[in-house]
Image (cartoon, rainbow, N blue to C red):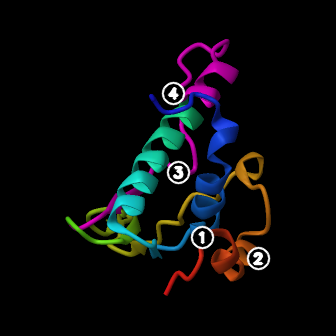
Amino acid sequence: MPPSKNISMYNDVRQILDAIGNREKASLLLDTPGQAVNFRQRVYTFKRLALEEVAARNAHLPGYIPSTPYDDITMDLAKGSNKLFFFRRQAPSRLMDEEGNPIEIEPLAVEDEFITEDPDDILENLETILGDTK
């Protein structure tokens, strides 16, 4: 059966990605490697659907390039592992002004429209959502 195209079927994924927030790294421990592969695929599907939703909502704006707060989140899953790692893509080098002073790159804030609950509450309740995450 193909993955659902209804974004509301991915609220568990949204909760996890919102809980990651602006953290640079996070990991999610699932019960089996198969569950980790399945969850990774659900994340990919959710990110695609979220982008399509934003694009459709703003299709009337000429030249609009859609983006979501989840675009810079990447994942890594070792073969046979049940631990899924999440990373935020970072700038590959240091940004400097014309005098050579470093410019701090602030992470993009998660947009309010994508937050379903307080991210700190979600992190504290991950065991309730997915079981033991350590």
Relative to residue 104, is residue 91 depicted above or below? above
Precedes in sequence: disc 3 or disc 2: 3
- Single out the residue that lies furthest toward the bottom: 134
Q: CA distance from mark 3 to mark 2?
A: 19 Å
- Residue at the disc numbered 4: 65
36 relative to 9, above or below? below
Label 1 element class = helix
Magenta stretch secondary structure, dominant: loop
Q: Amino acid at mark 3?
A: Tyr
| Discs 1, 2 touching: Cβ within 8 Å | no
Q: Which residue is mark 1?
A: 130
Q: Which one is in front in this view, the residue at disc 3 or the one at disc 4?
A: 3
- Secondary-structure class at tag 4: loop
User: The magenta stretch spans which residues?
Assistant: 52-78
Dot 1 amino acid type? Leu
Residue, x 59% and y 63% (percent of image)?
A: 16
The x and y percentages for residue 80 are 23, 68
Mark 2: few, some, or many residues within 10 Å (few <14, many ≥20)?
A: few
